[in-house]
Amino acid sequence: MDVGHLPLFASNVFYLKADIDVEPIKKIDTGFVKAAQYTGEQVGLIDTSKPNFQVLDQIPETKKALLEIFERINYDLLRYTNKWAISTSWITVTEEGLDGQVHNHRNCFYSGVFYFDHYDEEGIAPLEIMTPLQYHSSYKLQRADDMDNSPITLAEQWVIPPEHQKLILFPSYLNHKIGRQIGKKPRYSLAFNIVPIPPYGVADSQALDLSK
């Protein structure tokens, strides 16, 4: 049967192994943002030291390399014409038995996670990304085959495991979280947000550079 298939309105998530030197990231002097289980009383747990949300400013060559990768993907696949900047960046640590909170990132366009550590033991917390289609789950039907093997076109959630030097880029509006950390070794990752540089947009919806 000749059937056409249009996977319409996709949220474009990109992943690749990035040939980026991880040693400068490991040497960053920063407070960590910690992932924690939701207790009903707090949304997340932040280290007592002041967290740094611009860690990539300490290693500008790494910042430049990450942005260049996004710019190449943008040019080849997304085709936006404006310029870009990394706005915020931070390092997250998830300790044994903890997980992150479901959230997204406002005031930015794309978000990234770079796994600069080694993740050799079992039970390393994955990145979990949720569907943005609010009515999707209202029409969830019983499937005849294995429920855990639903195709990506029907997924309400997608799990991406960490790997050394893996870079993930996803639209900032997507809800996501760090899964449960089963492994005993703390799980480290670098996260960052990307914003368009004004001017961008069209007509009366333009964001203009007002600094001039």
Image (spheres, rainbow, N blue to C red):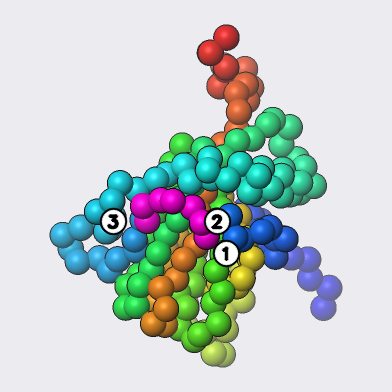
Q: In the structure shown, which secondary structural element does the residue marked by tag 2 occupy?
A: helix
Image quarter hosting the N terminus = bottom right
Q: Position of residue 90 (x, y in %)?
A: 45, 50
Give yes or no for residue 98 being in the magenta stretch: no
Residue drawn at x 41%, y 51% is 30
Q: Please report whichever mark, 3 or 1, sits nearer to the chain's N-terminal start.
A: 3
Which residue corresponds to the image point at 61% horizontal and 71% vertical from the top-left? 164
Q: Which residue is mark 3?
A: 47
Q: From the image, give the main secondary structure of the stretch colored magenta.
A: loop
* Residue at x-position 66% and y-position 59%: 21
What number is the disc on residue 156? Answer: none
Instruction: Give the number of the disc on residue 116.
Output: 1
Earlier residue among tags 1 and 2: 2
- Left or right of 131 on screen, residue 18: right
**Residue 121 placement (x, y as % from top left):** 51, 85
Q: Which residues are magenta?
A: 25-32
Q: Are marks 1 and 2 in contact (CB under 8 Å)?
A: yes
Badge 3 crowding class, 10 Å Cα cut-off, few under 14, some 14 to 19, many 20 or more, is few
